[in-house]
Amino acid sequence: MERTVFFAMAAAIVLSPAAYPQQGFFTKEDVIKYTPEWKGERFADGRPKVSEALLDRMKSVTLEEAWAVLRNAGYNHQYEDGWLVIHPDKVLVGRALTAEWMPGRPDVQRVVEEQGKLDHRIGAQNAWPVDMLQQRDVYVCDHFELKQDGPSIGDNVGNAIYARSGNGIVYNGAVRDIEGLKELPNFVSFVRFYDPSHHFGSLSSAARLNSTMVGINCPTRIGHVMVMPGDVVLGKDGGVIFIPPQLAEQVVKYSEITRLRDVFGHQRLREKKYTAGQIDTRWSEPIERDFTEWLKANENDLPVGRNEIEEILKERTQNQPRQ
């Protein structure tokens, strides 16, 4: 019988201790099964591994550009805003490692804690996914917007996240010790609230147990978005968009050609070579040819890497109609 996707804790029951370093509550096989359109490299836990080069290029993508590509591909629920942002002047980019909490329930908590002992997990549940982070991961966690007595991330856990990933978080809940978190220079983070309290997430505090972690590396709901492990996270300008890994390259390329066309169009308008009506519509073949020649003449001085421009020119040369 098929296991329920969203109650990934069931997978934890069958994990062996030796499998722990590679697997979370959602097994490697589960992650691969539910990310079938990714054909590239994967982490040992099954997560898609979008390349470092694409992550670097993703930093310049606007939320609108990413949204347009995803919407056109049928992904209508990938954007979420309404965040309290740590380091709002910076950009968050990385690969998602997900975690899911639910309101605390002692009987389920006992199962999870016992399985944690068998898997040789260290510390409380809020540390378990942190120990699995890789460089350039983003810890994406749904803590069901729990505020009072909810923060499972403070400056200690935040420092551990930062040490392992070099990145920040997207956290659908409250953090504490926010002044300490702000001291981490690239801990660019999107959270719901700040609250000075702390969460109670173990049976030692069963009388006040308020949350139980039921999934790691599983489908995770962040507001209106279903986030999958390995999604590319792009956070900037107060919003976060989650990009399926198989669309990351398409998003980047669309952004780069849009950026170049904008620079070209604005320059030609200032030069009065074309009218606004000519630029602000589908370009004619002469304008497209002018754009190609402009790329060739300026490829060392444009806001896109030379290698990427060479690739654009190659594609345009192959597709451009002959005179």
Image: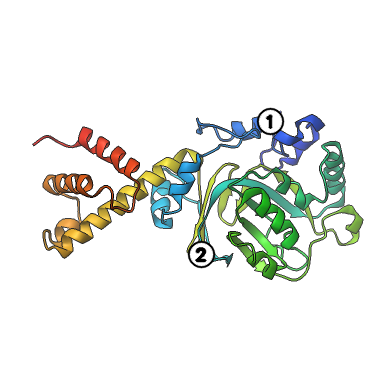
- In primary-sequence order, the first of circles 1 and 2 is 1
Res 288 seen here = yes
Query: What's the residue at 70%, 43% (across, down)?
Result: 132
Query: What's the residue at 87%, 51% (across, down)?
Result: 106
Q: Characterize the local packing of mark 2: few (<14), some (14-19) or many (20 or more) Cα atoms within 10 angstroms.
A: some
Q: Which of the two residues, 239 or 101, is positioned nearer the viewer here?
A: 239
- Side of 175 where 268 appears, left or right: left
The amino acid type found where label 1 is placed reads Glu
- Residue 231 percent location from the top left of the image: 54, 44
Query: What's the residue at 38%, 53% (across, down)?
Result: 65
**In this figure, which residue is indicated by the disc labeled 1?**
2
- Residue 130 percent location from the top left of the image: 71, 49
**In this figure, which residue is indicated by the disc labeled 2?**
238
The amino acid type found where label 2 is placed reads Gly
Q: CA distance from mark 1 to mark 2?
A: 39 Å
- Residue 233 percent location from the top left of the image: 53, 50
